[in-house]
Each structure stands twice: as structure tokens, then as C-alpha cells.
């Protein structure tokens, strides 16, 4: 038989006291933090509060965004959205749930780029950088292309130009179209072209182009300095960046925008086959007009001949 312990029993905390201590410790030691993750289980009860889970591939945390703060949040907050939020680490005492009380929420990743795009766009529009509407020479004497020498875009452009207008004088200025080096290279090349005295703004045109990609891939064309360089270009500029749904600041700053590289080539030069058809049709109209004129004159001659009388 084991001996009976005579030591006094430690005073026990109640569950509510334990949760209260845990809450105080979390709020004091961790405090306010920025956290990034994916939204899940977004719930909007009638109270106006928003409850959701923020997770990554290894963990998750329950979050609450109260009505007073929720009305200032511009992010749509849907399941699957990647967000950054500022909040206080706390604990919901009645259930003992560890949670994050959100104070501010903003889109992360793609959302940050879209936000920067809108800010740059508003700023440049206010400066008048999107006011270029100069007509492009048609057909141009010389087409100067700023693009990657190995991309699909330049192959498409050259193929369309060769098929439509073999007389086009095309010069490729190879530049990177993605990454940190792309924007400085394009600005430098555009500046060099504008300093060449033999180039004529009335006869020559610059095409800035690349194929499709993600917003991150196309970001070099959303640079405010490149947009200003395009706006100040002495030579008229056409921009054709990405696919039809892609729109960049370079597109807004250019004199003309084409939805794709191939479409840009189609707009820059005439179609030789269409011109040949037009010439053939004009030839047919001229031939028919000449035949009709000859027939009328022949009939008139016959009439005049019939009216002639021999002097004798």
C-alpha cells in the first residue's frame, strides 16, 4: 500500500483563467504582425464581420475581420485568393481558439502588381503620357523592331511582313523583353534610334513587341520610364505586347496599339495579295470601259458613214 501524500494540492486555474493568461501572453509577446497566405472558408454572416482561414501548405490559422475594418478593405476576399494581412494574434477565450484579428487586408503577389499598375497608370495619365495619336506612315519606308531575336513574336512578325509586303525594309534591334535588364535595354535602344539622323518620322516607324506571358513576364513593359521614353520618341511607335487581353503601359503610351505581334505586322503594311486583286479588278473595269467606248465609237462611225453621200 502506497503512502498517502501529505503535501498540499497546488491551487488550480480555471479553464477561463488559463485562456485569459494565454490570450494576454499572445497579445503581449507576439502583438501585431503581417502574415501572407491563402484564403479559405471565407464566411460573411449578417453581422458584417468576415471570418476566414489563412493557410499555406503546412499550417493554417483562423482569422476574424470585424465590420468596422471590413468596410475599408478593397480586396475581394474570395476562397483561394493570396493576401497579406496585418493583424493582432489573440485567443478566443470561450473556445480556446488561437486566432488572428485582422486590421487590414491587401492582395498579395499578382494583386500587388495590379495595384502598382493602376498607380503608375493614373500617374502617367495625369502627366499626359498617353496623349500620343500620331498617324503611322503607311506603308513605312523602314520598320525598326525592338524585340527578342529568338522569341516567337519576331518570327510571327517577320513571316507576316514577308507574306504581305516583301518590299518592307525591316531592321531588328535585339533586346531582352523580360527581367531586370529588359527595360533599360529598350529605353537605350529607343533613344539610339531617335538620335539617328537618317531616320525620318514621316516615313519610319518603331515596333515594340513580344509574345504572351504572365503579368510578371510582361512587367518590363509596365515601367514608367519606358512609357515616358515612348511618349517622347521622335519616331512614331506601335506597341504589340502579349495576347489580345494583355494591356501594358507601353501600349497606352504608344501612338498605336496592336493586340498581338501578328496583328501589328498586318496593320503596318499593305497586303500585296489584296492590292493585286484590286489591280486585277481595276484592269478588268478599264478593259470593259475601253470595250464599251470602242463599241459606242464604232456604232457612231457606222452612223456617220451611212450619212455620207458621194459628191458626184
Image (spheres, rainbow, N blue to C red):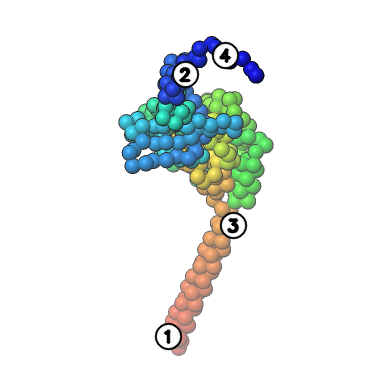
In this image, 147 relative to 309: left or right?
right
Whichever of callouts 1 and 4 sits on the residue coming sooner in the sequence is 4
Q: Residues within 10 Å of mark 1 (few under 14, many from 20)?
A: few
Tag 3's secondary structure?
Answer: helix
Q: Residue farthest to the bottom?
A: 312
Read off the residue under disc 4: 5
Query: Quadrant of the image for the C terminus?
Result: bottom left
Please provide percent x and percent y for residue 307: 42, 85
Q: CA distance from mark 1 to mark 4?
A: 154 Å
The relative height of residue 13 versus residue 199 in the rendered view (above or below) is above
What crowding class fits label 4: few (fewer than 14 Cα within 10 Å), some (14-19), or many (20 or more)? Answer: few
Q: Residue furthest right?
A: 150
Sort mark 3 into few (<14), some (14-19) or many (20+) by Cα contacts within 10 Å: few
Q: Earlier in the sequence, mark 4 or mark 3?
A: 4
When the figure is inspected, residue 155 is found, relative to residue 164, above or below; the finding is above
Tell me which residue sits at (48%, 40%) in the image. Answer: 41
Residue at point 44%, 79% (across, down): 300
Which comes before the other along the chain, label 2 or label 1?
A: 2
The one of 133 and 46 positioned closer to us in this rendering: 46
| Front residue (pair 224, 25) | 25
Amino acid at each position: 500500500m502506497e503512502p498517502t501524500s501529505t503535501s498540499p494540492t497546488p491551487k488550480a486555474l480555471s479553464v477561463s483563467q488559463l485562456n485569459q493568461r494565454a490570450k494576454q501572453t499572445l497579445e503581449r509577446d507576439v502583438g501585431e504582425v503581417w502574415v501572407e497566405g491563402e484564403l479559405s472558408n471565407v464566411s460573411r454572416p449578417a453581422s458584417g464581420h468576415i471570418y476566414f482561414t489563412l493557410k499555406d501548405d503546412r499550417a493554417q490559422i483562423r482569422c476574424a475581420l470585424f465590420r468596422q475594418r471590413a468596410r475599408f478593405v478593397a480586396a475581394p476576399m474570395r476562397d483561394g485568393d493570396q493576401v497579406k494581412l496585418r493583424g493582432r494574434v489573440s485567443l478566443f477565450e470561450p473556445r480556446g481558439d488561437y486566432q488572428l484579428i485582422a486590421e487590414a487586408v491587401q492582395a498579395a503577389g499578382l494583386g500587388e502588381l495590379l495595384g502598382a499598375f493602376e498607380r503608375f497608370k493614373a500617374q502617367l495619365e495625369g502627366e499626359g503620357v498617353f496623349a500620343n495619336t500620331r498617324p503611322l506612315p503607311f506603308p513605312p519606308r523602314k520598320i525598326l523592331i525592338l524585340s527578342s531575336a529568338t522569341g516567337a513574336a519576331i518570327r510571327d512578325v517577320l513571316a507576316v511582313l514577308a507574306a504581305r509586303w516583301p518590299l518592307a525594309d525591316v531592321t531588328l534591334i535585339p533586346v531582352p523583353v523580360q527581367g531586370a535588364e529588359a527595360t533599360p535595354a529598350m529605353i537605350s535602344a529607343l533613344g539610339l534610334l531617335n538620335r539617328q539622323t537618317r531616320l525620318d518620322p514621316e516615313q519610319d516607324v518603331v515596333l515594340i513587341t513580344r509574345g504572351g506571358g504572365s503579368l510578371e513576364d510582361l512587367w518590363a513593359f509596365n515601367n514608367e520610364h519606358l512609357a515616358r521614353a515612348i511618349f517622347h520618341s521622335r519616331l512614331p511607335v506601335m506597341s504589340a505586347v502579349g495576347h489580345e487581353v494583355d494591356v501594358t503601359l507601353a501600349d497606352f503610351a504608344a501612338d498605336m496599339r496592336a493586340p498581338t505581334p501578328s496583328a501589328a505586322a498586318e496593320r503596318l503594311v499593305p497586303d500585296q495579295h489584296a492590292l493585286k486583286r484590286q489591280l486585277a479588278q481595276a484592269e478588268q473595269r478599264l478593259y470593259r470601259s475601253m470595250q464599251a467606248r470602242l463599241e459606242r465609237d464604232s456604232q457612231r462611225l457606222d452612223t456617220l458613214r451611212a450619212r455620207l453621200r458621194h459628191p458626184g
